[in-house]
Amino acid sequence: MKFRYFGWLLLASALVLLACDRDKEPAAPQNAPVETAEKPAPTLNLPPDIGPPPSFDGERAMQYTKDIVKYGSRPLGSANHKKVEDYISGHLKGDQVEDDVFTAETPAGKFPVHNIVAKYPGTKDGIIIVASHYDTNYPLKDTNYVGANDGASSSALLLELAHQLRGKPLDGYSVWLVWDDAEEAMKPESEMPFMDDSLYGIAHLAEKWQADGTLQRVKAFLLADMIGDADLNIDRDTNSTQWLENVVYEAATRMGYQSHFFGRNNQVSDDHLPFVKRGVPCADLIDFDYGYNNVFWHTPQDTVDKLSPNSLKIVGSVILETTRLLSKMEPLPPK
Ligand SMILES: [Zn+2]
């Protein structure tokens, strides 16, 4: 991760131009409010009441985060990476799992890539995907970088989601959890743009599912990234689908968590882009303000002491509530 341009809600565009030169995407609208960046979002057919809120164990998700971090740095091709693959798979015993294994050709050479997909069937035709990458940044492999927030927290969150989803058919769409691999860049961004050297795993899945027709059944793609920060502020990503982000915000509001969501706009290049490109409604839930000025991101300071079980609970619950809302919305807005 990630090449990003910041669009602050409360600052004038001129200030943004001055402040964020490095992160600017030249073709992007400067600080355009979401409302004017694209056509107005369709009205949502929201159900009035969908019963008691979902449960999500933030403490257990935190324990999973610590377990993953204990393996150390987990760059592509490493022994630690293999241990984390086995750790994730080991928690999915008895579930319906699709292993998507292939060799990626990267600027740093050829590497094995392993996407892990766990499928929880629902009563309704259609799929909601919830994704997180689990690898750590390759150029940082020889530091003591462990990616507690960037990769471990969201991968742990998915493991806890599995607890809440397994056991009986879901009352609504199927939910597929995707631990995608080789998301991080293989070369430093100074040598190669992020978008030319990243997202190897998720791009492979999107292509494969387009070819076999699966993609047509996908109603929504929800991405979790850097969601463990104790100071939780999820950005509103302007590369995501506006109406789906509105459903996420509705879920957060119904649970009283709205103050943690969408305080600022941000244009994020992340794992969702291969699905955005193929017309799948996407929402990237990311807090790209990790420490003052995002100072802990991609540094050895990205450690578990910066995270909180409550942040994991907030994001996990909101994701579950979003899947429940989507399942009751008839019809969903057109793709
Ligand atoms: Zn990263």
Image (spheres, helix red, strand yellow):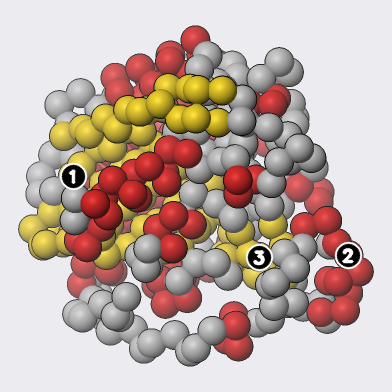
**Element marked by disc 3:** strand
Of circles 1 and 3, the one toward us is 3
Q: Picture coordinates of residue 266 (x, y %)?
A: 65, 65
Q: Picture coordinates of residue 104 (x, y %)?
A: 45, 30
Is residue 245 visible from the viewing direction of this image? yes
Q: Is residue 7 above or below residue 79?
A: below
Q: Residues within 10 Å of mark 1 (few under 14, many from 20)?
A: many
**Which image quadrant is residue 13 in?**
bottom right
Q: Name the N-terminal-most of marks 1 and 3.
A: 1
| Quadrant placement of the N terminus | top right
From this viewpoint, which residue is outermost toward the top? 79
Q: CA distance from mark 3 to mark 2?
A: 14 Å
The dot on residue 266 is 3
The residue depicted at 44 percent of the width and 63 percent of the height is 277
The residue depicted at 52 percent of the width and 38 percent of the height is 183
Query: Residue under circle 2?
Result: 19
Of circles 1 and 2, the one toward us is 2
Looking at numbered disc 1 in the image, what kind of residue is underneath it? Answer: Tyr
Looking at numbered disc 2 in the image, what kind of residue is underneath it? Answer: Ala
| Quadrant placement of the C terminus | bottom left
Query: Residue under circle 1?
Result: 120
**Element marked by disc 2:** helix
